[in-house]
Image: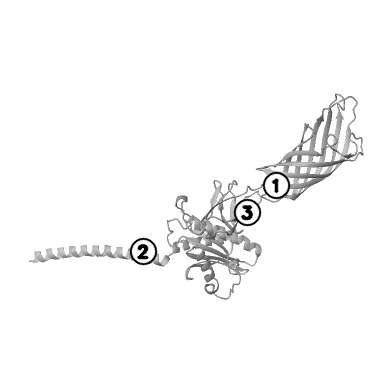
Amino acid sequence: MKSRIKDATIEDGGAMRTMNKSGLLIAVLLCAAGAAVFGQAKSGLTDQFSFFWDVNTGDATENKNYTNIITRSALIGFQQKGFKPVPSGAMGDVVPEIDRTQPLSQTVIPRLAAMAKDQGSSFVVLVSYTGGQSGTVFELRAWDLSGKVFYEFQERVRSGLELYNRLNDATAQLISRAGAVAKSSPEGTEPAGERTAKGYVQRIVVLSGDEGAEIWVNGVVRVGVITDGRLELPFQRLNLGSKFTVVQRKPGYYDDTEEFILDREWMELPLRPLERKVEHELTFVYTVGQFVGFGAGYSFYAIPRQLYFGAENYFFLQLSDTMGSHTVFHDDLRALVGLYLISVPGMAFKVGISTGVGCIFTMIAMPDSPLYTDIYFNVININVEFRLWEVTFFVREEMKLGLAVTNNLLGGGFYFIRGEIPIFSFGARIGL
């Protein structure tokens, strides 16, 4: 009897343990499913959000510097995690009539949320850096489109490096709070073979031959760097027909700003080549009518692209019957100062004028020939230039007025080629 009771107890216990394991497994699965559903319902967030900033330190220069730090670092941080931040501007520009004595949830967030919704975003992020002499406060907050805050980060910072570190911390925490990034492509990034018209700009790619150039939009937001000749911009829901400004920047080159009209849903925007900043330049010259000759010179730009000082030396031979069978050697040495009338960074075409003085040294290859010196005044030279890659080609008309003040050979008056053709020179400039 005891044996049967004992055996029954053992069997019942095994059954109970089996039931406990099954029940525990079912409970875990139900809880996991419930948590997943709850998390999805609670988050409701996609990987695209609208990003605003508010920087006010009391100093305009510091505001600009810290704005660059915040926008650049935050965008890079979010993009590296797979999010699609839409740079939407400074809070003060979007809502210029801010009453800072009232809660943001009542005065600003409804406007920002409405703008985010129009852009196709699922939530709003606002980064603030405000304060003064007593200390500066860094804040990063996020709201869903109903205006409910779901993340807040606030700390007092004392330096730019500390700001950078706090920004990284806040970004990482917000990413974990916002939930997993959707793996499917957001609107506007479908492959070319699966494109569906949606009535707004879905994709923008900028093309540039200036590898490594930084690309900025709206003048304040850095969106990336040209790699392999192209850069796909973060998705922004822009209306067809809207204007879009792109600024291209690269160390040692002039910034170049171009404005485009977004007239298609998938845009490729070819950018102009950047122009390198030049202070020192070599010049090579050839003058019409002085066939056996060649010149070289140097220019220094006191004001880049506007004002320069230069010197040129042109050596040529005269082979004719006017001096019998004797060769005539000429060496034209001149000093110039030039001013550009049309010169815009990014534009290959330039027009300028120059003036100066010079002296033509002449010697005839015959015994006892003296050295002639013809001093002249360059009344005006007109330059028309065209830049191709790193070389600038030019044509120049020269008006030289002989002064006949020394032992001269050419006499006074304006110089002409063969006495009737104005002097034209062709050449090239190469920056050093």
Q: Amino acid at mark 2?
A: Ala
The one of 388 and 46 positioned closer to us in this rendering: 388
Disc 2 or 1, which lies upstream in sequence?
A: 2
Q: Amino acid at mark 1?
A: Phe
Name the residue carrying label 1: 349
Please count the marks in the image: 3
x 70%, y 47%: residue: 349
The spot of residue 322 in percent (x, y) is: 87, 28
Name the residue carrying label 2: 36
Name the residue carrying label 3: 258
Q: Is residue 165 visible?
A: no
**Which residue appears farthest toward the left when viewing the image?**
1
The spot of residue 186 in percent (x, y) is: 46, 57
Quadrant where the C terminus is found in the figure: top right
Q: Is residue 182 left or right of residue 91?
A: left
Q: Is residue 87 above or below residue 328?
A: below
The one of 72 and 170 positioned closer to us in this rendering: 72
Q: Amino acid at mark 3?
A: Glu
